[in-house]
Amino acid sequence: MYAKRINKYRILCPDRPYLVADGRIYTNPTTAQLQRQGYKPLVEKEPCPEGEHYVYYEEDEKNVYICYGGREEYS
């Protein structure tokens, strides 16, 4: 799955199987087409913990990471 990081708590995923870019509609976009539009692979940084947690996102040059934090960190 590919995603763009909007902020720490929000990502944008393409509306598969369509990608609208530069006034064109791409059916079943290729990885290269997604990457040109700023999408990166969505990777789980660590396994989801047991109990209550919140979800946030980080990114580097290659990937967008889904991360989990404990309730005590969120308050």
Image (cartoon, helix red, strand yellow):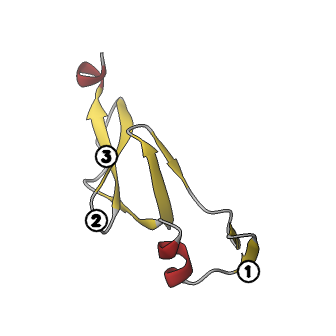
Type of the residue with mark 1: Thr
Q: Which residue is mark 2?
A: 61
The residues tagged by marks 3 and 1 sit, at their Cα atoms, a distance apart of 30 Å
Q: Earlier in the sequence, mark 3 or mark 1?
A: 1
Q: Which of the 4 image quarters holds residue 33?
A: bottom right
Type of the residue with mark 3: Cys
Local packing at callout 3 (Cα closer than 10 Å; few below 14, some 14-19, many 20+) is some
The residue under the point 54% across, 74% down is 34
Q: Which residue is mark 1?
A: 27
Measured as percent of width and height from the top left, residue 37 is found at 53, 68
Q: Earlier in the sequence, mark 1 or mark 2?
A: 1
As displayed, is residue 59 above or below residue 67? below
As displayed, is residue 75 above or below residue 53? above
Measured as percent of width and height from the top left, residue 52 is found at 35, 29
1 relative to 23 in the view: left or right:
left
- Tag 2, which secondary structure? loop
The residues tagged by marks 1 and 2 sit, at their Cα atoms, a distance apart of 26 Å
The residue under the point 75% across, 70% down is 23
Q: Do the CB atoms of the residues marked 3 and 1 lie less than 8 Å apart? A: no
**Residue farthest along the front direction in this orientation:** 22
As displayed, is residue 69 above or below residue 28? above
Local packing at callout 1 (Cα closer than 10 Å; few below 14, some 14-19, many 20+) is few
Measured as percent of width and height from the top left, residue 40 is found at 42, 67
Q: Nearer the viewer, mark 2 or mark 3?
A: 2
**Residue farthest along the top direction in this orientation:** 75
Q: Which residue is mark 3?
A: 67
Q: Nearer the viewer, residue 51 or 74?
A: 74
71 relative to 27 in the view: left or right:
left
